[in-house]
Amino acid sequence: MVLYKPMRRNLFLYLALACFIAITGIFIVDGYMGIYDTIYVTAGEYEQKIAPDWDRYRYPPSTGAVWGEPVHFRYEIDNRQFSTYSTFIQASLWKENEKVIDLFAEDKSIKPFNKVTVEWILDSEQLQARGFSAGQYTVKIERKGVERKIMVGYHIEYPVKPPIIR
């Protein structure tokens, strides 16, 4: 008669549990850990959220704005690491591969599992004072080897004439 030891009888259960924990840990570390950035662009009354999966876009994300109204940008960096993340954040406006103006530049230090939000405004009146007009512009956001681009299309809104009632 052979007696089975309890450890040997549950060996496969323990191995399956260890594999499940390892695979779950890999998904958590790979899918959650890291540095994520999100930008919120507000033009007029419309706020657009551009999520951390920037790389899935074939072309840079874009937004439209009325010439003469400001466009508000809010850039959020989420540090999902066990160490502090320090970076220099710079945002600038470009037209036809030439830098037009610097919008924002600042050093930031983000504690582990914390977020930092920076804000700036793109003012078309400031562009008009420099001789620029409505059209396509690119906002470039750079931080520690990462560059993000957002297209801003300014258009002129003409007043609508009321219909003639006869």
Image: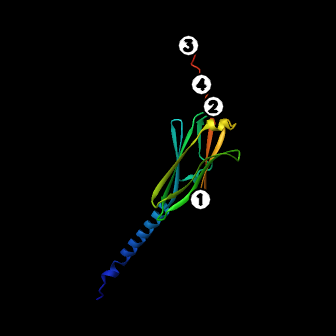
Q: Position of residue 30 (x, y in %)?
A: 49, 63
Percent across and percent down for residue 36 are: 52, 56
State the residue position of label 3. 165
Residue beneath label 4, please? 159
- Front in this rendered view, residue 116 or 1: 116
Element marked by disc 2: loop
> Are the two marked residues, 2 and 1, in contact with CB atoms closer than 8 angstroms?
no
Question: Rounded to the nearest whole Å, what is the CA distance between mark 1 and mark 3?
Answer: 61 Å
Identity of the residue drawn at 56% across and 39% down: 71
Q: Earlier in the sequence, mark 1 or mark 3?
A: 1
Residue sitting at the far bottom: 1
Q: Position of residue 39 (x, y in %)?
A: 53, 48
Three-letter code, disc 2: Ile
Mark sitting earlier along the chain (3/4): 4
Query: Secondary structure beneath disc 1?
Result: loop
Judged left or right of residue 54, residue 81 is left
